[in-house]
Amino acid sequence: MDRTAWIVVAFCVIGLVLWEIYLAKQMAPRPAPVSVAAGQTSPTATPAILAPSPLPTPVAEAAPGIAPTPSFAEKIETLRNSDVELRLTNRGGGIKEAVLLRQIAEKGQRVVLNSDQSAPIGAILEQPSTPTLPEFTASAESNSVVQFERMTAEQVAVRKKFFFEKSPENKDNYVIEMDVNLENRGDKSYQSSGYFVALGSAAPIHPRDYPSYTRLVWCIDGRAKGIDVGWFGSSSGFVGLGQRAARPYYQESIAGAEWVAVSNQFFITLIAPLTAKAAGIWGKHFDIERAPDQKLLGVEGALGMPAFELQPGQTTALALKSTLARSFTIASRNFRTMRPRSWTSGYSKSSASFCSTS
């Protein structure tokens, strides 16, 4: 080769090395400080919003799946419209599975979002890496509403309602609202150092789906960011640069995300706090074995929310303004144009939808 060719080759090698260094820096989580002003307690005992505590850092990798099997029997309640069937569990009071009635996967089976090995969508967790799913008592108010209730050891009554959002459309009705109310029935102030809301999990629909589409995604200031399941694996790097060991979890404190989601190549489950922003992100991958020689990867996620305080004697009506009773939306998978479908100001409602990518 002549001199010019050697120069071109040298520049290409330098470019590859710089690219690997750049990717290594981009893949590592960059925690950002979260500044949330402390709230003030009103004479009517409005819940105070405290500055969020740092999200705990996991110290060991947990096996795929949720917490050990509880001592109580699982009970399933069902909500259904023409587009989606929700299977709600009393374990954590959330959505165990969402069956898309108009979407077909392999072998003529319907698409199912979330896995029974993951935390239910909408479950409130103290630490998603070791989730505790307490027993809720379910009651069906009607064919269109399911309510869960439980009393905590601190004498805080927790009530959740799941129901479909009213829509004039006859199709693509994937929005499910979740009302959460808290009532402090104790004689002491109840304080939480922060909590997580489970996103459930996402997994490939077909064996040949691109792994890069199985992702944990979030949006800050209108810009979507995310990691795919490859982030968790080890890497040998390039010519000794960018080497890393396998990583069990992704966990990051953030300055505020409009929404957080888990997705595969075709579907997404997205949760968006409407009056506040997520203060943290958590995710992990898990193995899926569909055949002895076929192993796929899924991703499970949760969004972190700030600390809060409930004063003694606070009623259900006041709980409508607490940080535990927010609005959420789970919507379609076009990250550039995605907007929550119920962007309102109420603390008491949550809405969720399950959609395919067009």
Image (cartoon, rainbow, N blue to C red):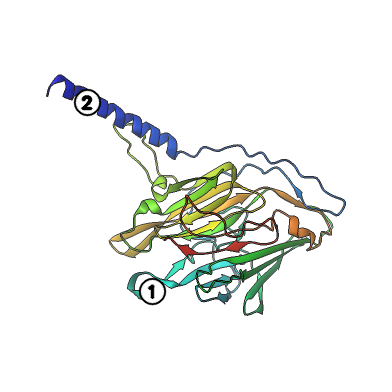
| Mark 1, secondary structure of its residue | loop
Drawn side of residue 22 relative to residue 309, left or right: left
Most foreground residue, 132 or 333: 333
Quadrant assignment, res 315? bottom right
- Numbered disc 2: secondary structure: helix
Picture disc at residue 151: none
Residue depth check, mark 2 versus mark 1: number of the one nearer the observer: 2
Find the residue positioned furthest to the front.
168
Of pointers 2 and 1, the one earlier in the residue sequence: 2
Looking at the image, residue 345 sits to the left or right of residue 183; the answer is: left
Q: What residue type is labelled 2?
A: Val
Can residue 58 be spotted in the picture?
Answer: no
Q: x, y percentage for residue 23?
A: 39, 36
Q: Write down the residue under mark 2.
A: 8
Mark 2 touching mark 1, by CB under 8 A? no
Give the vertical position of 172 relative to 273 (above or below): below
In the rendered structure, find residue 109 and report the number of the disc placed on it: 1
